[in-house]
Every structure is written in structure tokens, then in C-alpha cells.
Amino acid sequence: MRSMTPDTASAEAPTFLDIEASGFGRSSYPIEVGFVLPNGHTYCTLIRPEPHWTHWDAQAEATHHIARALILKRGRPALDVAQQINAQLGGQTVYSDGWSHDYTWLGVLFDAADLTPAFKLENLRALLDEQQADRWHTVKTQVSSERGAQRHRASSDARLLQLTLLRLRERK
């Protein structure tokens, strides 16, 4: 588990969540979850695979640089992760740019924990008007470039989404 201090905290920013996974498809599962709160506080943790979570995609590993051996060694149990997420996100609407995948992977995580999410996961698109949606990828690339090299990890990705939204809102 990793918690970082806020950088450029902003109360008007919604909470963003991102999940890194073992790959794509029906047998994939979450290996890392991260989020950033409205005040800029980030949370990120690796998830230890359940015994029946065996799918592993080498291309996914090459993208997020998280080896299966690492999650087996340092990952936290699904129940612990689900409880921690619920404790910090309970009652909130949380946004994701990969809603369909993240929703599925949250389902896998919470099913393994035998819990129900205490928050609502919503598509990032719900926050954007047409003009913002048209500019999203350009602005996201600019913000990413300004931030410099960042690890492709769940909390870093969630923070990038939050900062991109804030930049789009500044330019309205």
C-alpha cells in the first residue's frame, strides 16, 4: 500500500480510480487498484491473486511493469483491498476512463471478497461536455508531458485523469 501527499489539491476535482489487470478478457483479474481523492490524496495497492486467478498476459505486464511474482509476494488479499477501498470511497461517485473494464475488474475483486462496493463507479464521459470530450486526449497528452516520466501504475493514471479534467475546466 502506498499513500502520497497531495500535489495541487483541488476540492472541485472528483475522485478517479484506475485498475491495472492481468490482461483483458473473461479470465483477467485486477492486480493493482489506485485512486485519487478530491484533495489530491492518492491510494495504491497491489492485489494478491486468488488461487483460481491464473490468467496472465505478457503484453499487459510489459505495459504496467508489474510482474506476477511481485503481486504474489507483495499483493494484499482481495478482502483487505475491498474493505480498504470501501472505507475510503464509501458513498462517493468515483470516475474511470476505462469504465467497462474497471467495472468488471471491481466485480471480480468484490466477488472474491464477498462484499459489495460502497461507492458508485461512473464513466468519466459523464463529467465532460462535447467540447471537453473532443479535447480530452490532446489535453491529457499535454498534462502527461508536463508531469514528465511517470510509472504506468493505477494511482499515477488516476491522478493524470483528475489533472486533465481540472485543466479542461480551467479553459472553459
Image (cartoon, rainbow, N blue to C red):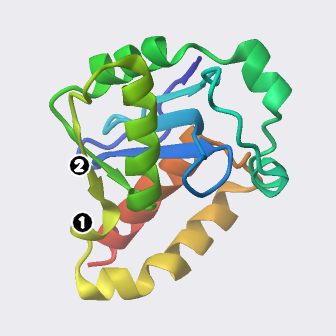
In this rendered view, identify the residue nearer to me: 63 or 36: 63
Residue at left 74%, top 48%?
64
SS type, badge 1: helix
The image quadrant that residue 110 belongs to is top left
> Mark 1 or mark 2, which is nearer to you?
1
Question: Is 8 located above or below residue 115 in the figure?
Answer: below
Residue 89, how many percent across, how many down?
Answer: 28, 28
Q: Quadrant of residue 84?
A: top left
**Residue 42, position as x, y percentages in the image:** 48, 31
In the picture provided, is 90 more to the left or to the right than 39? left
Q: Quadrant of the N terminus?
A: top right
Q: Is residue 156 above or below residue 3?
A: below
Give the mark nearer the N terminus: 1 vs 2: 2
State the residue at coordinates (47%, 56%).
Answer: 101
Q: Which mark is residue 12?
A: 2
Local secondary structure at mark 2 = loop
For badge 2, the amino acid type reads: Glu
Judge the density around disc 2: few (<14), some (14-19), many (≥20) Cα neighbours within 10 Å: few
Question: Exactly how many numbered labels are in the figure?
Answer: 2
Q: Which residue is mark 1?
A: 127
| Disc 1 to disc 2, C-alpha distance | 12 Å
Q: Which quadrant of the structure image shows residue 142?
A: bottom right
- Residue 18: % across, % down: 49, 46
Amino acid found under the numbered disc labelled 1: Leu
Residue 53: percent from left, percent from top: 63, 32
Residue drawn at (29%, 68%) of the image? 169
